Image (cartoon, rainbow, N blue to C red):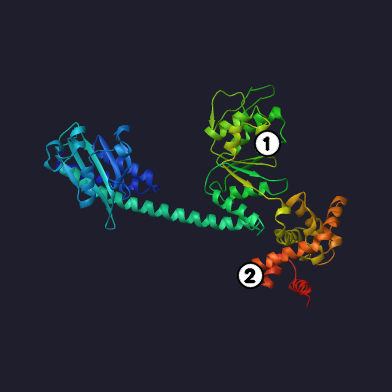
Amino acid sequence: MTVDQQQKTSFEALYEITRSINSILEPVALLEKILESAMAHLNAERGSVLLVDEAKERGFSVVAAKNFGPEHSGDKFAASSSVIQQVLASGSPVLTFDALSDERFESSTSIVAQKILSIICIPLRASEKIWGAVYLDSSVSRKAFTEESLKFLTVFGHLAAIAIENAQRYASLRNENEKLRNQVDVTHLFTTMVGKSEAWKRVLGIIKRVLDADVAVLITGESGTGKELVARAVHDGGLRSGKPFVTVNCSAIPEQLMESEFFGYVRGAFTGAAGEKKGLVEVAEGGTLFLDEVADLPLLLQPKILRLLQEKEYRRVGDTKNRTANIRILAATNRDMREEVKAGRLREDLYFRLNVVEIHLPPLRERREDIPLLATHFVRRAADTYKRAVDGIHPDAMQMLLANQWSGNVREFQNVIERAVVLCTGKQLVQEDFMFDASDRATILRSATTLADFERQVIEATLAEMGNNRTRTAEKLGVSLRWLQYRLKEWSGE
């Protein structure tokens, strides 16, 4: 092949390579493609792409390597660190036709040990910055690389460095955009999770920390505390936002049907299985599987759920091959899972796998200072839904709500507010609008003897939290400023 032909071939190769690498925006895939292209054109036996890494003792990290074998991975990689370090330090390429007799590398033990004959190494430079290097060698042929090889690889290196710089900028912008989007989404999500009590702040703090960690989460708490709401918030604000969110009520599926509902079945798996059916695990692919009432999982199914958690594998009923599942698992229960383990109703290893992170939701009676906020939120939502002109709650009615024990928690509280809004004929909810059961009325009456003390404790605590700002205190409590001032005046004896 003549020099002109070689140059034409190199030019055509550069054109194809540049078009190829410029279409790749994922840094790792790009580096692998750069190495593949360089080795293919120069017929190199071994090769690697390295990036500058000052945190490493050698000053670089191996990010892509081919044909070195496992013994040369990680810190054992010694494809001639002296050559690579020289290129990174000087910014100039290195070409040697016979490395074993080259005086520049006579102290390199790796060259002697591996009997390396030919080496070519060029810097990856863009915007006056050296990003890394491309290293190729041969232990079979002397003069495996020529001056033409060096010219080609040098030009290729400049183009590759620009592509790396662009890919990293793109990845950085994408990550920043994702971060900002998640922040906006989380802010939106938490507008439906009302509360400012310390107990509720702790819950929100844990939720925020698990959004970007694709781990199993166990949500515990009494019935009606909002466990599914929290599960949806974790999904919608997390890495799998926009993907399926599939809820399984483990207490509502007959035990004999549970395995086929979870994992699906193949044709002929049992009488009546005339075709194939996807299970809920497969329906949730890419998204989140929410196991509600997880303590009701039958013992025979628990090992298969454990395998799904550990290995991300499952098998359809009647099938002979395993399938993989790319899902996140969230679970919820109103029972004490440790007691379930002690009683032998729940496998201990399954409990630990489900409970990587626990989010415990406090009952409403332990976050009474959130009641005025929740009431205002539910009144506004119900008024909008049912087209009512209700815009608040009378202080006497609020006192009654504060005195209730709310055994049904937030769910019961929301139902009571919605019913009162529907029945209300004025602009404010009054005591007569609330239809409590006889047992609830008895509880309220028993609490009435200490209601004044309770009311004063709540107001004084809120005043302290608001820095003695009466306007903000009234807003948080959902009462009028005039009513608050009257109460404070009454207590001061003025």
Taking depth in this image into account, of 67 and 79 the one nearest to the observer is 79
- Image coordinates of residue 274 in percent, x first then y, are 66, 25
Residue 37, position in %: x, y? Answer: 29, 41
> Residue tagged by mark 1?
339
Residue 197 visible to an observer of this rendering? yes
Residue at the front extreme of this rendering: 493
Residue 303's place in the image compared with 62, above or below, is: above
Q: Is residue 91 visible?
A: no
Q: Quadrant of the N terminus?
A: top left
Query: Is 423 situated above or below 229?
Result: below
Going by the image, does 362 lie left or right of 123? right
| Residue nearest the viewer, comparing 443 with 431 | 443
Kindly indicate the quadrant of the structure image that contains residue 278: top right
Q: Are marks 1 and 2 in contact (CB under 8 Å)?
A: no
Amino acid type at circle 1 is Glu
Q: Quadrant of residue 418?
A: bottom right
Q: Which residue is label 2 attached to?
A: 467
Question: Where 420 falls versus 266 (above or below)?
Answer: below
Q: Considering only vertical position in the picture, is 431 above or below 303?
A: below
